[in-house]
Image (cartoon, rainbow, N blue to C red):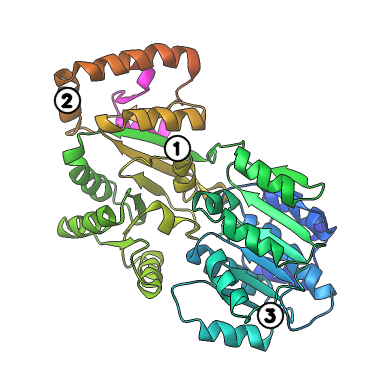
Amino acid sequence: MSFERLGLQAELLDAVAAEGYTSPTPIQARAIPVILEGRDVLGGAQTGTGKTAAFALPILQLLNRGERGRLPRALILTPTRELAAQVEESVRTYGRKLPLRSTVIYGGVGINPQIDALRRGVDILVATPGRLLDHAGQGTLNLSRVEILVLDEADRMLDMGFIHDIRRILKLLPHKRQNLLFSATYSNEIKSLADGLLHEPELIEVARRNTAAETVTHVVHPVVHTRKRELLSHLIKGGDWKRVLVFTRTKHGANRLANQLMSDGVSATAIHGNKSQAARTRALAEFKSGAVRTLVATDIAARGLDIDSLPHVVNYELPNIPEDYVHRIGRTGRAGANGMALSLVCLEEEELLTNIQKVLQHKIQVEKVPGFEQESASASRQTPSYRQAVARRDTRGAKEGFGRRPSSRRDERQGNGDGRNFKRRG
Ligand code: AMP
């Protein structure tokens, strides 16, 4: 399959080639022709599947053929500022050779430059819901010419409580328009949003529902929680990892961990919602350039970060919401590259792990790290409830799930059969 066969015009094909894309990803192959036909799309695709180009390329082509004015004709809503900035950057990159203008508006930065940009005229507007409504409320934005609406990472927008904002925004748009909704997960809430929004949509699902990318190997390292940081430093240094994204549950925890890693001699920086936009952009740039090898992030801050094919993503703490695990590891194993998602799991997190495995629909392989297994083993001796939990899981595992076979690569690394499934442990 080639981009030429999808019906894209020469300027867009040039841009895609300049990005080094040789063939369309599955979501691109399926969505681009449908969007070019003007149809609505319900896209089940997580970050890393190439979904941004899947909607940006056909939107650019459709708008380029239409009549230009001063008011936005495409509106792309995203849950976070980072994602908004990245999507707009992609739109700009792909549309380099077309006479279309795009701009991005989000909160946390001055509103006046945004007002100026809107006044100068915009074809494609990328925005987060809150700031968009601020503009609409104060009369600096007119959405009456929007022909195409995109809700990107709609599930995350709902998680973040944007449903009322979205409904208010919908009221500001012309009734007749093309709607594209992308979501990594497909809950009842998404279904009801889609039902009210989309007209005879083409359903395009590229990864199995609620399933993480197949190219990702998942591993759990059991560890007592007081030794998590030590284990993390050990893994990063021992494996000579150059770029690793680490997730913590809290902003405070992210800061503390980044500082502790630095005192262990591992360069690290934190990214979370309490940081200014400038500080977040700086942290991301340092990480992307390789100046800093560890980026510690909270779920919300990391959402939508466009970091190419990260080899390692670490769950320093498991997320409370199992779907967040899927979002987190969407940062690795991108565009066919292999990735590893490692979770440092203490006894207190066993239940969270069980829930995550239900969402993934498979068990995650457990590997004890030499030198750290003692603590978790002794912990299991000290707490009979842990042994019972393992025993319960063993019987359940036999009925419910299957453990992923360790890859041969890891068999070698583990040497003597340390890689085990929960099923086989105990
Ligand atoms: P997205 O899912 O939109 O966040 O895209 C994930 C990453 O894949 C981005 O860094 C894109 O630059 C990259 N990408 C998108 N389309 C392709 C393609 N057809 N071939 C290779 N890489 C791509």
Position of 80 compared to 38: left or right? Answer: left
Image: 332 above or below 354: below
Identify the amino acid type marked 2.
Answer: Ala
Residue located 58% across and 66% down the image = 87
In three-dimensional space, the C-alpha distance between marks 2 and 1, rounded to whole angstroms, equals 25 Å
Position of 184 compared to 72: left or right? Answer: left
Residue under numbered circle 1: 322
In three-dimensional space, the C-alpha distance between marks 3 and 2, rounded to whole angstroms, equals 60 Å
Q: Which residues make up the magenta segment?
A: 407-423
Image: 347 above or below 202: above
State the image coordinates of residue 213 (x, y, percent, origin top left).
54, 41
Contact between marks 1 and 3 (CB within 8 A): the answer is: no
Position of 17 compared to 314: left or right? Answer: right
The answer to whether residue 221 shows anywhere in this view is: yes
Which quadrant does the C terminus fall into? top left
- The circle on residue 122 is 3
State the image coordinates of residue 29 (x, y, percent, origin top left).
74, 51
Position of 300 compared to 99: left or right? Answer: left
Q: Residues within 10 Å of mark 1 (few under 14, many from 20)?
A: some
Of badges 3 and 2, nearer the viewer stands 3
Identify the amino acid type marked 1.
Answer: Pro
Residue under numbered circle 2: 379
Q: Residues within 10 Å of mark 2 (few under 14, many from 20)?
A: some
Residue located 81% across and 55% down the image = 33
Residue located 76% across and 63% down the image = 58
State the image coordinates of residue 224 (x, y, percent, origin top left).
20, 34
- The circle on residue 47 is none
Identify the amino acid type marked 3.
Answer: Val
Of badges 2 and 1, nearer the viewer stands 1
Q: Quadrant of residue 214?
A: top right
- Dot 3: element: loop
Is residue 161 magenta-colored? no
